[in-house]
Each structure stands twice: as C-alpha cells, then as structure tokens.
Amino acid sequence: MTLTKKVYEHIDKLEKENERLEKYIENLQVVHFTELQTEKAENARFRKALEFYADKKTYETNVTDQWEPIAPIDQDQGEKARQELEQSK
C-alpha cells in the first residue's frame, strides 16, 4: 500500500468520525435546548406561585368573618416566598 493511499484512507476515516461527532453534537444541542425550555417553563410556574404567596394582598382577610385561629402561613405573610424570589434574581 502506498503512502498516498494510506493518507487518503486516514482522511476518509477522519471525515466519517467528524460527521459522526457533528451529528452527536447536534443531537446534544437539541436535547439540551428541549431540557432548557422545559426548565424555563417550570421556573416560570414556580415564580408565578412564589409571587402569589409573596403578595401581601393574598393574606388580607375580613376580620369580621375570621372565626378560626391564624394559620402559620398567614403569620408568614409570604416572607419565605419573597426571600426565594430575591435569591432567584
């Protein structure tokens, strides 16, 4: 086998490996993009829930209609949620 033929065979192998790697990278990008979109949507849902619990208006009650003891969540007034929102900025 001549040196030239060996070089061309090696080049062919490298080109095939390069194609395989390019497809692999493309698949990884698709998977990661999909995962990222899913995580972004999930994060938006969590943020919306946290914003609800962080809003002090959520805890306003009509005192005349309040017959039961105050629950711990009412005492919190969304403090834990506000802390989480602040940390995620």
Image: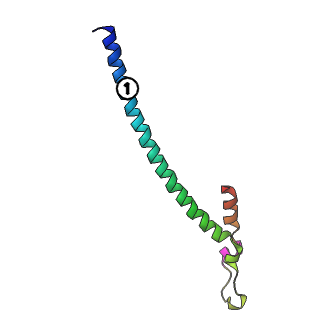
Q: Secondary structure at mark 1?
A: helix
Residue 18, by quadrant, is: top left
**Residue at 57 percent of width and 61 percent of height:** 44
**Residue at 44 percent of width and 42 percent of height:** 28
Q: Is residue 49 above or below residue 59?
A: above
The outermost residue toward the bottom is 64
Q: Nearer the viewer, residue 66 or 55?
A: 55
Amino acid type assigned to the residue bearing label 1 in the image? Glu
* Image coordinates for residue 42, horizontal then vertical, percent: 53, 60
Q: Is residue 12 above or below residue 53?
A: above
**Residue at 67 percent of width and 61 percent of height:** 85
Q: Nearer the viewer, residue 85 or 13?
A: 13
Q: What range is drawn magenta here?
A: 71-76
In the picture, the quarter occupied by the N terminus is: top left
- 69 drawn magenta: no
Residue identified by numbered label 1: 15
* Image coordinates for residue 30, horizontal then vertical, percent: 44, 46
Q: Alpha-carbon neighbours of circle 1 within 10 Å: few (<14), some, or many (≥20)? A: few
